[in-house]
Amino acid sequence: MWNIVGQVKLPDPENLSGMHPSDCNRATPGKIINDSVFPGTKFMLAKDSMNGYTWLNFKNGDKLFIIDCGCTDFTWVFQFTSNRYSGDTTNMKYWYLKASELLRNAAIGVYPGSIFDIKKSADTLITYSKKYPDSVKLNQEIYFYKGAQPEENDNSDEVAEMQDMTPHFIISRIEQLPAKQYMIEITFSVGL
């Protein structure tokens, strides 16, 4: 079980400390996971109402910590912890597949109509890794386009504007933890 009370400093990935929700384009962070689907899910809103935090334990022993943040954008950071997988943290083809499995497990509890389609992201990871095998790497932006992904060397203003307003995600971190656990971090974002 998560020790929420003992958490000394909760993460603030967007560095929103000192800001006020009225300074932002987005609403106050809220629950992402339906606790009737995953009983025991814990949600906490930061004192300044700028970040929301969710803790979830899966029946298979995996854990999920979610940070809901952003001011001029929506950002969700999913940090999965699991001891069911083991591999070289630089083998991104392996971790893309595992990240897809973890997202698929979490997707059933994400409220319908949420800003990010977690099931679609799981499917997109598989499709992307097959279609763009040379681009399977850490921090590779993957977009939820209806058409093809833009070419990596296409730096036009039109593509940059489209990317800013298009939901996208990255596998932002793979880390080996003590007790044969691994943390897989996936960050979702879209500009407002």
Image: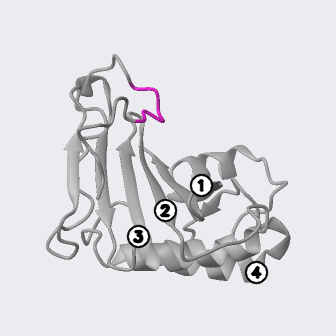
Q: Which residue is mark 4?
A: 131
What separation in Å lies between label 2 and label 4 (alpha carbons)? 28 Å
Of badges 2 and 1, nearer the viewer stands: 1
Q: How is the image coloured?
A: one colour
For marks 4 and 1 on the same chain, the one whose residue lies earlier in the sequence:
4
Residues shaded magenta: 11-16
Q: How many marks?
A: 4
Residue at horizontal 60 percent and vertical 46 percent from the top = 161
Q: Residues within 10 Å of mark 1 (few under 14, many from 20)?
A: few
Q: Which residue is mark 3?
A: 117
Report the amino acid beneath label 4: Lys
Report the amino acid beneath label 1: Leu
Q: Residues within 10 Å of mark 4 (few under 14, many from 20)?
A: few
What separation in Å lies between label 3 and label 4 (alpha carbons)? 20 Å
What separation in Å lies between label 4 and label 1 (alpha carbons)? 31 Å
Report the amino acid beneath label 2: Thr
Q: Which residue is mark 1?
A: 177
